[in-house]
Amino acid sequence: MGHCSVCGFPTALAIEGLRSLGPDGIVGGEPDGGAAVAAVPAHPVPASPSPEAELCATISRDLRNKMEYVRELGRGAPDVTNEMCQAALSEAEGRVSEALEVLRRAQQSLDRQTDELLTRRLASLEARESALRETGVRFAIGGDINRLRGSIDGGQREVAGGFLVEAERRMTQFESDWRGLQGLLRQIDALRKEAADLGIPLGEIAGEVSEIRAQLQEPDITEDALDTIAQSAAQTLMLLHEAIPTSLEEELARHESSLDRYPDDHVASAPARRLHSEAQRHLKKGRLTDAVASVRELRREVERLEQSQELHDVAVGAAPAEPPRAAETESETLDRLLKKARSLAGRVRTLPPDSEVAREAAAQIREVTDLLRNRELRGADQALARLMRMLASEPGEN
């Protein structure tokens, strides 16, 4: 027989149960003695919560509100979730006094840990601000730190948490921007030093760098001010990258004219030719530091070569001068250049086919071919000389 899922009364006897109820819901009309028995209410009225239970609810709400703003502090934020769960379980089992004690301990622990965290993070902010000053910049964050310290001292934990999050965000962004600006300044100083060593005039660039340094000495630099300084530094670096290559190209052109006076098979000039080709390659690839270093070595090599040539001229000064050679005809010059081009093309084919030098040499061979086809013999002769210097700079070339 089926039964009611709520009260367990047999469902087959439901009609009989209804018949037994009187018009006022009294079982069997009037029971013995004539006393009316009221029907039992379907839903009993719950008892009012005790003062301890109400206090548990109040502390729980306070803890939940505090946990919300404490979580915004991120790393190291205190957490009393386990204690709150333990208190809820104790209260559900009827141990309200025990739950209240657990919640009070959790409340005290959360406040204490929050105060400790705010104090530690304030000290960290002050240390980071001091470290920035030691690197040469004074960040305008003193007002934020003072407000944060005042709210901590006044016990305004939620307000202090908001100040802390904003101050740390500003500090992190400023530190990142400052590292980027320091990188730009290091590049500028390195290029300026190399340009000064080579005697390259920089014009107004030196004044721009001095102005950047002066701006960094200002107190209370904001994020916007640092961004403006960084833009000026980037512009100055770009000017350096334009000025230095122009001067190096002019100097390399002068050295090329000097080296063209020596025969292609002149042994003493081979190191200078190699350095000249190396400097051109670095300059073409935008490697300014390497190009400056190669030009510096090239200067010393050219100076040594010129001194050796002067000593040689003095030693053979009394010897009879060789009769001047007859000038080449255009056909003879073309034939000589074609032979040299074929010889150099053969040497190019011995290079590793996937190397950078092989690709550059092949491009120069094509340039020489076009110049010879157009009868531009002087240009072809200069291009062949550059190609020979480049090949001579490669290790393993004889």
Image (cartoon, helix red, strand yellow):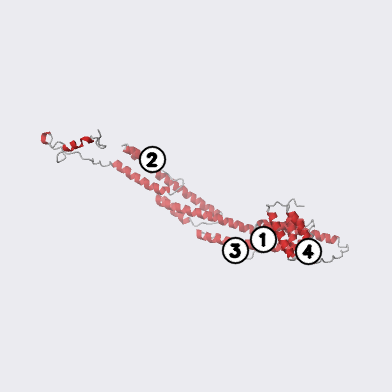
Give the mark nearest the N terminus, 4 or 1.
Answer: 1
Residue 178 is situated, as x and y percent measured from the top left of the image, at 54, 56
Report the Cα–Cα distance between label 1 and label 2. Answer: 69 Å
Q: Nearer the viewer, mark 4 or mark 1?
A: 4
In the displayed structure, would residue 103 be above or below residue 316? above
Q: Residues within 10 Å of mark 3 (few under 14, many from 20)?
A: some
Give the mark nearest the N terminus, 4 or 3.
Answer: 3
Q: Residue furthest left?
A: 34
- Decide which of 215, 246 is in the foreground and name it: 246
Give the mark nearest the N terminus, 2 or 4.
Answer: 2
Q: Nearer the viewer, mark 1 or mark 2?
A: 2
Amino acid on which the number 4 mark rests in the picture: Leu
Q: Are marks 2 and 4 in contact (CB under 8 Å)?
A: no
> Which numbered marker is on residue 83?
2
Residue at (59% x, 57% y) in the render = 185
- Using the rendered view, name the quadrant where residue 315 is placed: bottom right
Mark 4 — residue?
A: 334
> Residue 313, can we see it?
yes
Mark 3 — residue?
A: 208
Report the Cα–Cα distance between label 4 and label 1. Answer: 44 Å
> Which numbered marker is on residue 196?
1
